[in-house]
Amino acid sequence: MQVNLNGRVALVTGAALGIGRAISLTLAKNGADLVLNDIDRPSAEALTQEIQKLGRRAVMAIADVSDYAQVKRSVNEALVHFGQIDILVNNAGWDKGIIPFLKTDPKDWERVIAINLIGLLNCTHIVGAQMAQRKSGKIINISSDAGRGGSFGEAVYAGCKAGVIALTKTWAREFARDNIRVNCICPGLVDTPLLAKLKQDDLGKKVLERIEQLMLLGLGKPEDIANAVLFFASEESHHITGQVLSVSGGLTFQG
């Protein structure tokens, strides 16, 4: 898919690796300039240079999305540099591992919720405010099919991702008056460094390989998610808001 995003600025959270990296490169290849949020400075620097070689502008926004003050500082710096943010991709996410709920540590719940849910609230509250002032914007939230159908050993993560879906629908209703479209993408399993890490223990490997077997089209690639983001970021989706799209190789079928 090839679209024209010339003159648009996109902020991608969790941009440095995996799905975020693929999203950032895909948007850049279609003309967008990038604000790259991550906490991994070396990887973010490498991606910044790669995007600049494509002839697009790119700046880093090193910040923990769960920290409102850090996000606000980094967004303000990006606005000084670019003047506006047209596209927000709430991609940053994390899970500790495949662990049955009764064996999880409440301290780990806090970190999972902070990254997967609070981070989304922080970024949308800050970036959405300047979009509302300009009466224009696209917000694309990366949830998960775990949020649509549950996922063994990922109770808190799945709960957060279900919350992302509900927020998408609520924001779509609230932000429509400001000409802001809000949509959500639910990946299945995608071949990323995080997936490889989750497979390192025996239970994680067993559960995730079973899920892969249920994916009719097989394990996803980061580019599969990036192409869906590109569609929602483009003018081709101007009449779509509040929608949830599973890009999961046939893992789930939702009405």
Image (cartoon, rainbow, N blue to C red):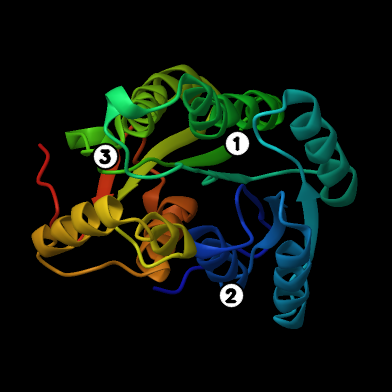
Q: Residue at x 75, y 68 (%)?
A: 48
Q: Which residue is mark 2?
A: 29
Judged by depth in the image, the label closer to the viewer, 3 or 1, is 3
Q: Name the quadrant containing residue 223.
A: bottom left
User: Is residue 226 visible in the rendered structure shown here?
Assistant: yes
Q: Which of marks 3 and 2 precedes in the sequence?
A: 2
Q: Position of residue 147 (x, y in %)?
A: 28, 34
Q: Disc 3 designates what residue?
A: 146
Q: Residue at x 46, y 42 (%)?
A: 96
Task: Tell me which amino acid carries mark 1.
Answer: Ser
Give neighbour class at mark 3: few <14, some 14-19, many 20+ (Cα, 10 Å): many
Report x, y in % for residue 187: 31, 52
Please, what is the three-letter code of the amino acid marked with disc 2? Lys
Q: Quick one: 198 or 33, which is closer to the camera?
A: 198
- The residue sitting at 14% across, 69% down in the picture is 217
Q: Is residue 154 left or right of residue 9?
A: left
Look at label 3 and name its amino acid.
Ala
- Residue for badge 1: 136
Q: Is residue 102 left or right of residue 123?
A: left
Instruction: Give the mark, 2 or 1, whose residue is nearer the N terminus.
Output: 2
Please tell me how crowded label 2 is: few (under 14), some (14-19), or many (20+) other residues with Cα within 10 Å. some
239 versus 48 height, above or below: above
